[in-house]
């Protein structure tokens, strides 16, 4: 078994991003700028947004954070998004998910100018991705492609089983792994919690991408020997034995699956770190107007 190390791959790509950002700044006199909107104080969201801001600084981007209390209305948020859409000094905008129940995440995503939608969640970006046109690819699927690329893994002709059909990971991932590219060129099966013969399906996977949001959901009896295992899970549980006060678990039972796998991502230290890289790459592409003029 070999580890797909998110720390190693992300640090390597961030050096490349930093070099490109420095060149952009030298030419334009400004830094690529990412703005994040955070509603409430969910522990996970606080951590991820803080990490996004810190990584922006590391690679020479400007970053801004706009915070709201949990009782902010949908209208107030949309009004703010419209202001940011019109701000030429902001290249990329994200609204950290999840949002409180009274706010419809699709209305919020739809309000973001697709040319600043560096999370790649806007229907225009998702539609363009379907057509294999230039677009912002959702940050986590993009990070997974970059991870496979960083390790030189050829996915052509393999059977990829995606577990989970969310709009931000499972569904776009299934499209990306099927398209005519490498990584890609796979036969893809998209499974989910209502798939009746899930174990048999996952057993067929040369590549398994677990994104169902359930701790240790993929067990050793579901995995074909030699499979490549990508674990997108970030299940947080409180813990009295860790300094942070929580422990992270993936969607894969790492201890028992790892000995069977050819390659596997750990949690933490795997896909999460690559998600941030996907976001940084989209923000840089936006600043450089590589996708939209
Ligand atoms: N607007 C968005 N919201 C959410 C997204 C997203 O892509 N856009 N994805 C997830 C959370 N997420 C990014 O926002 C994210 C998750 C995990 C990590 C990460 O670095 N994980 C570390 C561990 C960090 C820890 O100690 O908790 C790791 O896996 O090593 C970064 C980003 C939902 N919301």
Image (cartoon, rainbow, N blue to C red):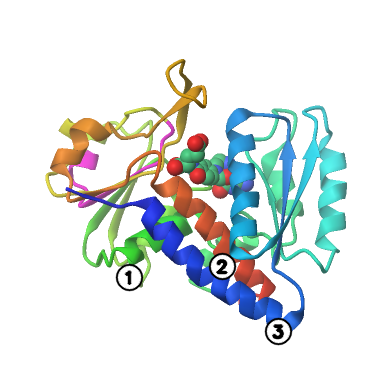
Going 53% across and 53% down the picture, which residue do you hit?
Answer: 276
Going 62% across and 69% down the picture, which residue do you hit?
Answer: 284
Q: Is residue 205 left or right of residue 177?
A: left
Residue found at the very far left of the displayed protein: 225
Q: Are marks 2 and 3 in contact (CB under 8 Å)?
A: no
- Numbered marks: total: 3
The numbered mark at residue 27 is: 3
Residue 146 image position (x, y, % from top left): 41, 63
Which secondary structure, mark 2? helix
Compared with 136, 249 (above or below) is above
Going 76% across and 73% down the picture, which residue do you hit?
Answer: 30
Residue found at the very far bottom of the displayed protein: 27
Which secondary structure, mark 3? helix
Q: Residues within 10 Å of mark 2 (few under 14, many from 20)?
A: some
Identify the residue under disc 2.
Answer: 128
Q: In this view, does 165 lie to the left or right of 105?
A: left
Residue 175 image position (x, y, % from top left): 42, 59
Is residue 138 within the magenta segment?
Answer: no
Q: Give the extent of the magenta segment.
A: 201-213
First in sequence, mark 2 or 3: give its number. Answer: 3
Residue 269 figure quarter: top left
The residue nearer to you, when weighing 80 against 277, is 277
Identify the residue under disc 1.
Answer: 182
Compared with 290, 128 (above or below) is above
């Amino acid at each position: 078994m070999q580890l797909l190390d998110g720390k190693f791959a992300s640090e390597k790509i961030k050096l490349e991003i930093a070099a490109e950002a420095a060149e952009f700044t030298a030419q334009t006199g400004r830094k690529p700028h990412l703005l994040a909107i955070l509603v409430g104080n969910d522990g996970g969201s606080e951590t991820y947004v803080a990490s996004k801001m810190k990584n922006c600084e590391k690679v020479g981007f400007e970053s801004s954070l706009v915070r709201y209390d949990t009782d902010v209305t949908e209208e107030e948020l949309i009004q703010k998004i419209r202001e940011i859409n019109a701000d030429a000094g902001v290249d990329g905008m994200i609204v950290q998910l999840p949002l409180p129940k009274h706010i419809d995440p699709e209305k919020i995503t739809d309000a973001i100018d697709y040319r600043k939608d560096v999370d790649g969640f806007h229907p225009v970006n998702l539609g363009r991705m379907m057509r294999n046109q230039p677009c912002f690819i959702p940050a986590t699927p993009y990070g997974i492609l970059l991870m496979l690329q960083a390790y030189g893994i050829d996915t052509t002709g393999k059977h990829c089983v995606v577990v989970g059909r969310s709009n931000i990971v499972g569904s776009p991932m299934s499209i990306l792994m099927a398209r005519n590219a490498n990584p890609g060129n796979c036969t893809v099966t998209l499974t989910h919690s209502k798939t009746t013969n899930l174990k048999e399906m996952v057993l067929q996977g040369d590549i398994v991408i677990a994104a169902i949001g359930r701790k240790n959901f993929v067990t050793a009896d579901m995995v074909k020997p030699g499979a490549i295992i990508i674990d997108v899970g970030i299940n947080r549980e409180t813990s009295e034995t860790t300094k942070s006060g929580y422990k992270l678990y993936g969607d894969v039972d790492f201890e028992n699956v790892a000995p069977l796998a050819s390659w596997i991502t750990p949690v933490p230290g795997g896909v999460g770190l690559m998600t941030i890289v996907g976001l940084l790459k989209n923000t840089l592409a936006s600043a450089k107007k590589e996708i939209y003029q």
